[in-house]
Amino acid sequence: MPDISIVIPLYNEEESLPELVDWIERVCGEMGYRHEVIMIDDGSTDGSWDVIKNLSKDYNAVRGIKFQRNYGKSAALNEGFKAARGNVVITMDADLQDSPDEIPELYRMITADGFDLVSGWKKVRHDNALTKNLPSKLYNGVNRWISGIKLHDMNCGLKAYNKKVVKSIEVYGEMHRFIPVLAKSAGFRKIGEKVVVHRARKYGVSKFGWERFINGFLDLLSIQFISRFGKKPMHFFGLMGTIAFFIGFISIMYLIASRLVEGANFGLTNRVTFYLALTTMVIGTQFFLAGFLGELVSRSAADRNSYLIEETF
């Protein structure tokens, strides 16, 4: 069994892969690590998969998984985590902006210092300041505020995990940005950070745009909700529904009592308050039903990760 599983999701990175694998092999060889390199081709349209197959012939440690089409980084990481056999799992991007020289220290922090998860921090970035650096700082600031996890760069692709972490979480949708949040919600509390070298892109172009920051914020709200109420939606919707229905019901009872006291000169349905109270009761009922349906779904939902894998070795 390998000491380290290095999981690399990729999309159209054929030029960088030989140099990346050679660099990883050199570092792991110098340190004497038993390792495997799992490369997940997320439906690339260039020659990335052919490069991976050729690399597997030259390096016994290289394994490959190919998706039929592009499913996204979360899907690629999830499959890589499933395939990983090492006691320590390290993820990195395939564009050579993450340095394999960071592997020994990340490995030491997991095995010697006892961290469950160590996230890289690209303290000095070689990206466009307007389109990536500034939005990234704002984005990570909001993440720290909402999640309570004090990481400077939660979305850094260079991370190290104890094997138990990756086998305990499910990464889907666009949740790869919030793996530390997923780990925390799964009960892994020892989360650390390491300043890592960020290198300028050598080949190709970035695959990400401005929309990732908007989507990321929405995903963070989703994951915060799911982590608290994903297995017990009735605790949220049922509570909201009960409160709304109770407020409406009390208001209706008050109006009826006023009608009885004031006599026939008072028209119950002539007051706006009556319709507001009735609407509140209806909304409360809908919230309660939503919670009930959520409970049924959460108990019978099939696996959300269903991918068509074309080839693997």
Image (spheres, rainbow, N blue to C red):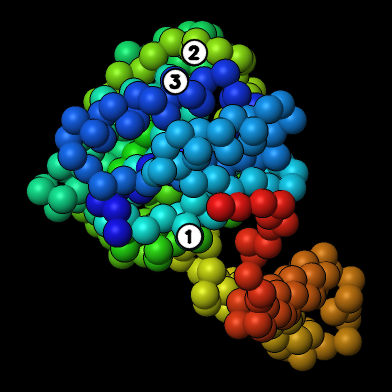
Q: Indicate the secondary structure of the residue bearing disc 1.
A: helix
Q: Is residue 93 left or right of residue 51?
A: left
Q: Do the residues bearing badges 2 and 1 touch, measured as CB atoms within 8 Å?
A: no
**Residue 7: % across, % down:** 44, 43
Residue type marked 1: Lys
Name the spot of residue 223 as percent of width and height, x first: 51, 54
Rendered position, 127 above or below 150: above
- Secondary structure of the residue carrying numbered label 3: helix
Q: Residues within 10 Å of mark 2 (few under 14, many from 20)?
A: some
Is residue 123 depicted above or below 174 in this figure? above
Q: Amino acid at mark 2?
A: Arg
**N-terminal of the two: label 1 or label 3?**
3
* Dot 2: element: loop
Q: Which residue is at a point 25% across and 51% down the rendered structure image? A: 3
Q: Quadrant of residue 306?
A: bottom right
Q: Which residue is mark 3?
A: 19
> Can you identify the residue that label 1 sits on?
82
Per the rendering, the mark at residue 201 is 2
